Amino acid sequence: AQKITQTQPGMFVQEKEAVTLDCTYDTSDPSYGLFWYKQPSSGEMIFLIYQGSYDQQNATEGRYSLNFQKARKSANLVISASQLGDSAMYFCAMKRSGGYQKVTFGTGTKLQVIP
Amino acid sequence: EPEVTQTPSHQVTQMGQEVILRCVPISNHLYFYWYRQILGQKVEFLVSFYNNEISEKSEIFDDQFSVERPDGSNFTLKIRSTKLEDSAMYFCASSEPADRGDSQPQHFGDGTRLSIL
C-alpha cells in the first residue's frame, strides 16, 4: 500500500519569498512517480510537477522544484518567488509505475501568500 | 494545451435519483479515472478504466457506481441511486500510454460538484 503524509495543514509565506511544502511517502514499490497538484479555491486540480523514482536529478518546472530525497522518502515542493496567485491547496501524490495505476493523495497543505 | 473537460460543473439531485457525470478525456490518452473529494477532505480514487474495461476500483466504488465509454470521446460515471454521502466533487482524469514514460501524470478535469438533497 502507498501512503502520503503532509504534516503542514497550513502555511503562510510573504510575497516574493520562497516556501517549502513538505511531503513524505511510504511504498514498497520499486518504481513509482511522485506528483504535486495545486487546487485553487475554485476547485480544479492543476498538475504542477512530476518526479520519477529513478530520476537522478530533481524535477523543476518554472518556479516549482521538487526536492527529492529517496533515502528519506521525501518529495518536498519548493515554490520560489511566491505570488498572490499561488494561494491554494497543494496536494502531494504518488502512483506506481504503469499506465493505469491509481494516484494516492496526501491530505494537502493550504498555502496563503501574504502581500 | 489539451485538457480534460467535465460536464456539468455543478449538479443538484434529489436523494435516490440517478445521476450521470460526463467527461471528455484528452484525445490521445488511453487511461481514464474517476476520483472524488468530499468537502474539506483529500482526493480519493474511485476507478480506473483501460481498453473498455475497469482496471481497478476502490471499495467506495460499489454496485451503485458504473463507468462507461459509450463512444470514442466520452467517459461517464453513473451513480444509480444517490445517497446524501455521495455529495462531493468528482474529478475525471486521463493519462498517456505507459510506454511514454514510467509514470505519466494524470491530468484532471475541473470537476463536477455533486450536491444530493
Image: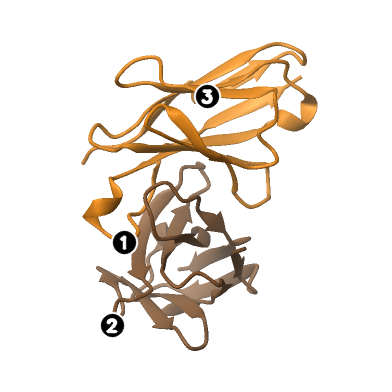
Chain colours: A brown, B orange
State the residue at coordinates (28%, 38%).
Answer: B29
State the residue at coordinates (31%, 21%).
Answer: B73
Q: Share a chain, discs 2 and 1?
A: no
Instruction: Give the numbered dot on residue B42.
Output: none
Q: Residues within 10 Å of mark 1 (few under 14, many from 20)?
A: some
Q: Residues within 10 Å of mark 3 (few under 14, many from 20)?
A: many
Choose top left, top right, bottom left or bottom right for residue A81.
bottom left
Label 2 is placed on what type of residue?
A: Gln
Mark 2 and mark 1 residues within 8 Å of each other at the beta carbon: no
Secondary structure of the residue carrying numbered label 1: loop
Q: CA separation, marks 1 and 3?
A: 26 Å
Instruction: Give the numbered dot on residue B67.
Output: 3
Q: Which residue is mark 2?
A: A56
Secondary structure of the residue carrying numbered label 2: loop
Subunit that carries the residue with mark 3:
B
Q: Share a chain, discs 1 and 3?
A: yes
Label 3 is placed on what type of residue?
A: Val
Q: CA separation, marks 2 and 3?
A: 38 Å
Can residue A20 be spotted in the picture?
no
Choose top left, top right, bottom left or bottom right for residue B84.
top right
Residue A27 image point, x, y percent: 56, 71
State the residue at coordinates (54%, 77%).
Answer: A22
Subunit that carries the residue with mark 1:
B
Can residue B113 be spotted in the picture?
yes
Mark 1 and mark 3 residues within 8 Å of each other at the beta carbon: no
Q: Which residue is mark 1?
A: B102
Residue B116 image point, x, y percent: 72, 22
